[in-house]
Amino acid sequence: MANSQKPESLPYLTPTQVAEKFKVSPITVRQWSSSGKLKCQTTPGGHRRYLPEDVAEFAKSAGISLDDLSTGPCRIMIVEDDSQLAHLLQEFISSYDDTFEVYLAPDGFRAGELLHTLKPDLILLDLMMPGMNGFEVCERIKRSPATRNIKVVAMTGFSSEHNVTRILNAGAETCLKKPIDFALLRDILAQCNSKKTA
Amino acid sequence: MANSQKPESLPYLTPTQVAEKFKVSPITVRQWSSSGKLKCQTTPGGHRRYLPEDVAEFAKSAGISLDDLSTGPCRIMIVEDDSQLAHLLQEFISSYDDTFEVYLAPDGFRAGELLHTLKPDLILLDLMMPGMNGFEVCERIKRSPATRNIKVVAMTGFSSEHNVTRILNAGAETCLKKPIDFALLRDILAQCNSKKTA
DNA sequence: TGGTAATTGGGTAATTAGGGAG
DNA sequence: TATGTCCTAATTACCCAATTAC
């Protein structure tokens, strides 16, 4: 189950599903929609359907704990063209906590795909990959509302002071130097884990 | 259908596709048809197929605006790292039909992102880009149910017989040789146009 | 042409949802 | 503000043979 593909989730939520996320009754969710606080769409039969982004926006505006309830298990994407290192990271993460779901993106295309289909909680991002500018990728992730709350941990073998500053300014959590210090990585995973309240 | 000459690739919708548009299960779509609320055609085997116009009419009668592709314009993604060529293609397409929406993906990451966020109708795919294997990309697009009906037109400057065969086997509509023959491109756009019912 | 996985239709039962007044 | 209940309607689950897609 290590590097399996696609966890394609439904692009909408029913009232009951939304209610479960907020730990309230479906009737309450109905009220939120009626009063306009929670945007919703409707089926031809009049039933309400909720888009994940609308739910997230409502959670934020209401100050309720937002992202962890909606995500489920912790998903981690490893963007790394060095297959050996990628698998090493994957093994380490899985052995640290086998509830983490780890996905590998060996190239930019896969990274872009998984970013929007998998919607990971954490991204380990190699800054030096052919045909891909890691800095731009990080900036783009942080610029889009749909992805900006994803944690990005940069990885690089040529960590000049300037580059480290640049990637941190782009919104990365931290910048790991190669070879990877697995103690640091474990700390990062610990933070990722503490986020889970379930 | 405005100007379609051939019933080559009719824009029929399957029950599942209609269900996705209305955020509902395929079973519900079946009920709508059984009760006569949603008109449908049937295959020789008895399976239901839906015309976009019938779906649009049903949506209107239910007071729902379809945000998605049924009524939307034709979206085209150009995957090409040569900025000059990319813009040239964009200009040509826009001048051919200014209702076409053209988006540029200068690298693999943008291509992967746009594939799932934009959900284009047609992809012009450069096979030779750094850090991106065009053949693999095409195969992946055609393998996933969510994207397999997107038309892929390959573009390459080194079109060996073997490579052309390979990309066509991967599911590409055709393989354009560089420099691009714009007459051929126009024909492709014409097919893309006949798909539109709006 | 042939093989295999995914989708579909039919029918009925079970679950969920909306509206409103409490 | 959030929720429980009643009634009716909309939506979905389940089973299995046929059809369709790749």
Image (cartoon, coloured by chain):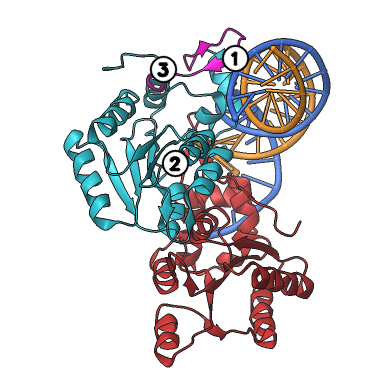
Chain colours: A red, B cyan, C orange, D blue
Residue A65 location in percent, x, y? 57, 69
The label number, if any, that marks residue B3 in the structure image: none
Q: Is residue A91 visible?
A: yes
* Within-10-Å neighbours for mark 2: few <14, some 14–19, many 20+: few
Q: Are marks 3 and 1 on the same chain?
A: yes
User: Which residue is located at x 54 percent, y 19 percent?
Assistant: B32
Q: Closer to the N terminus: mark 2 or mark 1? A: 1
Give the mark toward the camera: 3 or 1.
3
Q: Is residue A37 visible?
A: no
The label number, if any, that marks residue B8 in the structure image: 3
The chain identifier of the residue carrying mark 3 reads B
Give the mark toward the camera: 2 or 1.
2
Magenta stretch: give its range.
Answer: B36-53
The chain identifier of the residue carrying mark 2 reads B
Residue linked to disc 2? B160
Q: For the view shown, which residue lies furthest in the bottom direction?
A: A161
B131 shown above or below B3: below
Q: Amino acid at mark 1?
A: His
Residue linked to disc 1? B47
User: Which residue is located at x 43 percent, y 32 percent?
Assistant: B173
* Within-10-Å neighbours for mark 3: few <14, some 14–19, many 20+: few
